[in-house]
Image (cartoon, rainbow, N blue to C red):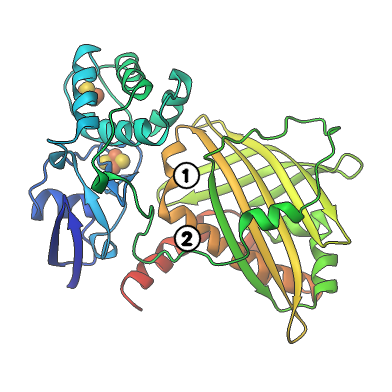
């Protein structure tokens, strides 16, 4: 058993939990919060969505033991909240529910939408709501209700304002160079690329990471400069073609986060500034099976550090639309990105030394994702 202390609906709670108990079962069975509904139990349907540190999060794929220190709100806690009251009224007026099974999860997401994106239009609302599935009502009434409230959201009580999102146990915030600083140093993209450059919303998700490479900067840069080698070093990436003149790479990027697996096929433009040792990769791709589109821009900067080594700073901004959209904001994604960069840098060092890159590290994202989850669990238990 593991002892966890967390805040649930404003009350501090300390409980012993089994390592295998997932957060949804803990909330339903131990805390009697039966608004937390279980549909798929695979992170797909969104029925189990609650607010964790102010952000919507699925609870069927998180362990209760990893929730130490977080603050959770289920819809039982929103009786006096003016935003939720407006949403409830609007859902009733616009027929936003029928059987109600999906409704608690939908309302948690709707609350996030109207408070984070006031004035959101129906298209954006549909994107944001893509991670919540409804089997009976359909989505027109939900979108109309959320649109109405988002147009003029009531102000929230001060204690309901999100303070520090995604502070889930086991996920430490990266502390590399600030993303804006890295992006400012990156090479500007040429306009002539024969592909659509990614258009990212102002509130696109952002991950910043730093990795020390066991290579002198000039050697590391020579490897980073070689697109084929970089693609071979990136777990889950398969380069199909690279047009060196246009700087456009086409390929497939396979990822697996928890139970979700996706294979994004698309194109990216790669540009370098050799003087500054910076680069930018911008592009997007689509996973046809889940009808999910991901766009992103990755800026990187390489600097020499002591001991003949170098530091790689990476700033990634991305936006995901479609079936897997809600996954893209989860804490596991940040953990997975850290592991991916770690494996990537290890592969780079091998490539620079003329060694063969481990085929299993580049074959796909599935084993890698399991490592992401197990790393998170190990940290949660202090192992
Ligand atoms: S029950 Fe959690 S996403 Fe379906
Ligand atoms: S209202 Fe029935 S599943 Fe959504």
* Quarter of the rendering containing residue 161: top left
Q: Residue at x 27, y 23 (%)?
A: 135
Q: In the rendered view of the protein, which quadrant contains the C terminus? A: bottom left
Q: Residue at x 18, y 16 (%)?
A: 92
Judge whether residue 176 can be spotted in this image.
Answer: yes
Q: Secondary structure at mark 2?
A: helix
Residue that badge 2 annotates:
335
- Crowd band around label 2 with a 10 angstrom C-alpha radius: few (<14), some (14–19), many (20+): many
Residue that badge 1 annotates:
328
- Crowd band around label 1 with a 10 angstrom C-alpha radius: few (<14), some (14–19), many (20+): some
Judge whether residue 358 can be spotted in this image.
Answer: no
- Residue nearest the viewer, comparing 279 with 114: 114
- Residue nearest the viewer, comparing 246 with 243: 246
Q: Secondary structure at mark 1?
A: helix
**Residue 184 image position (x, y, % from top left):** 73, 52
Q: Is residue 235 above or below residue 19?
A: above
Residue located farthest toward the bottom when viewing the structure as drawn: 307
Name which of mark 1 and mark 2 comes first in the sequence: 1
**Residue 329 image position (x, y, % from top left):** 44, 46
Question: Whole-Å distance between the Cαs marked 1 and 2?
Answer: 12 Å
Q: Is residue 201 above or below residue 6?
A: above
Q: Is residue 61 above or below residue 103?
A: below
């Amino acid at each position: 058993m593991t002892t966890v202390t967390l805040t649930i609906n404003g009350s501090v709670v300390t409980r012993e939990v089994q390592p295998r108990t997932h957060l949804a079962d803990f909330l339903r069975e131990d805390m009697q919060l039966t608004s937390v509904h279980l549909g798929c139990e695979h992170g797909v349907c969104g029925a189990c969505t609650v607010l964790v540190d102010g952000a919507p999060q699925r609870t069927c794929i998180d362990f209760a033991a990893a929730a130490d220190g977080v603050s959770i709100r289920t819809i039982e806690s929103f009786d006096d909240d003016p935003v939720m009251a407006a949403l409830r009224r609007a859902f009733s007026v616009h027929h936003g529910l029928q059987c109600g099974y999906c409704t608690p999860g939908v309302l948690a997401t709707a609350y996030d939408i109207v408070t984070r994106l006031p004035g959101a239009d129906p298209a954006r609302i549909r994107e944001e709501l893509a991670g919540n599935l409804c089997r009976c009502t359909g989505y027109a009434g939900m979108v109309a209700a959320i649109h109405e409230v988002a147009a003029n959201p009531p102000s929230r009580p001060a204690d309901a304002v999100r303070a520090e999102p995604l502070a889930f146990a086991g996920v430490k915030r990266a502390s590399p160079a600030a993303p804006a600083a890295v992006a400012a140093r990156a090479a500007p993209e040429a306009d002539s690329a024969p592909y659509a450059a990614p258009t990212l919303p102002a509130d696109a998700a952002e991950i910043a990471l730093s990795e020390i490479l066991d290579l002198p900067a000039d050697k590391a840069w020579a490897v980073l400069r070689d697109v084929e080698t970089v693609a071979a070093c990136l777990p889950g990436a398969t380069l199909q073609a690279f047009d060196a003149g246009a700087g456009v790479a086409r390929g497939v990027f396979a990822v697996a986060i928890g139970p979700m697996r996706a294979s994004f096929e698309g194109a990216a433009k790669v540009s370098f500034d050799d003087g500054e040792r910076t680069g930018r990769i911008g592009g997007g791709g689509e996973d046809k099976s889940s009808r999910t589109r991901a766009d992103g821009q990755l800026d990187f900067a390489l600097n020499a550090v002591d001991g003949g080594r170098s530091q790689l700073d990476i700033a990634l901004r991305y936006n995901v639309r479609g079936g897997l959209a809600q996954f893209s904001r989860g804490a596991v994604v940040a953990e997975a990105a850290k592991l991916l960069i770690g494996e990537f840098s290890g592969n780079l060092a091998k490539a620079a030394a003329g060694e063969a890159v481990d085929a299993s590290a580049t074959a796909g994202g599935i084993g890698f994702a399991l490592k992401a989850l197990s790393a998170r669990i190990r940290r949660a238990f202090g192992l």
